[in-house]
Image (cartoon, grey):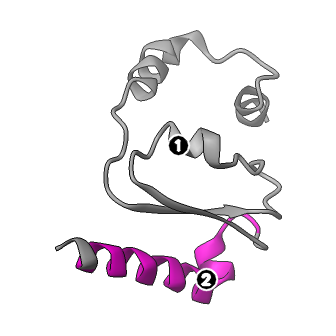
Amino acid sequence: MHSYRHRYGLAAGDPRYAATQDALAGQPSITVPTVVLDPTEDTVAALYGSPDHGAHFTDLVDVRAVDAGHNPPQELPGVFADAVRTLAEIVDARN
């Protein structure tokens, strides 16, 4: 329960993990082409949206809101496969 409260900013994190959290926060951006699938029915994480994703991915191809829960690849395998195909086409076009 505390994990979810912490995730949503409703509780402080465990101070024993502060150094680990700081190290994770300082990681470099992901520079490969990326398609993000944002599940609209996820009860675990809210729909974060493009601005948040842009801070982590320097080559953000697309952010796709999908009618799925917490596991879009399992719930919508065709949508997931389409995202992978999009990335394969981009990589092929760049090479």
Identity of the residue drawn at 16% across and 74% down: 95
**What residue did someone put label 2 on?**
79
Identity of the residue drawn at 36% across and 46% down: 30
The residue lying furthest to the front in this view is 93
Q: Position of residue 89 (x, y in %)?
A: 35, 81
Residue 75 lies in what quarter of the image?
A: bottom right
Q: Position of residue 14 (x, y in %)?
A: 61, 16
Q: Position of residue 74 (x, y in %)?
A: 62, 79
Label 1: how many Cα within 10 Å (few below 14, some 14–19, many 20+)? some
Identity of the residue drawn at 58% across and 76% down: 73
On the rendered structure, is 30 left or right of 9?
left
Residue mark closest to the camera, 2 vs 1: 1
Verify whether residue 47 appears in magenta.
no
Q: CA distance from mark 2 to mark 1?
A: 21 Å
**What residue did someone put label 1 on?**
54
Tell me the magenta residue range.
Answer: 69-92
Verify whether residue 87 appears in magenta.
yes
Residue 22 lies in what quarter of the image?
A: top left
On the rendered structure, is 87 left or right of 37?
left
Secondary structure mostly seen in the magenta stretch: helix
The residue lying furthest to the bottom in this view is 78
> Which residue occupies the foreground of this view, 61 or 16?
61
Q: Earlier in the sequence, mark 2 or mark 1?
A: 1
The residue lying furthest to the top in this view is 15
Identity of the residue drawn at 61% across and 83% down: 79
Vertical placement of residue 4 versus 18, above or below = below
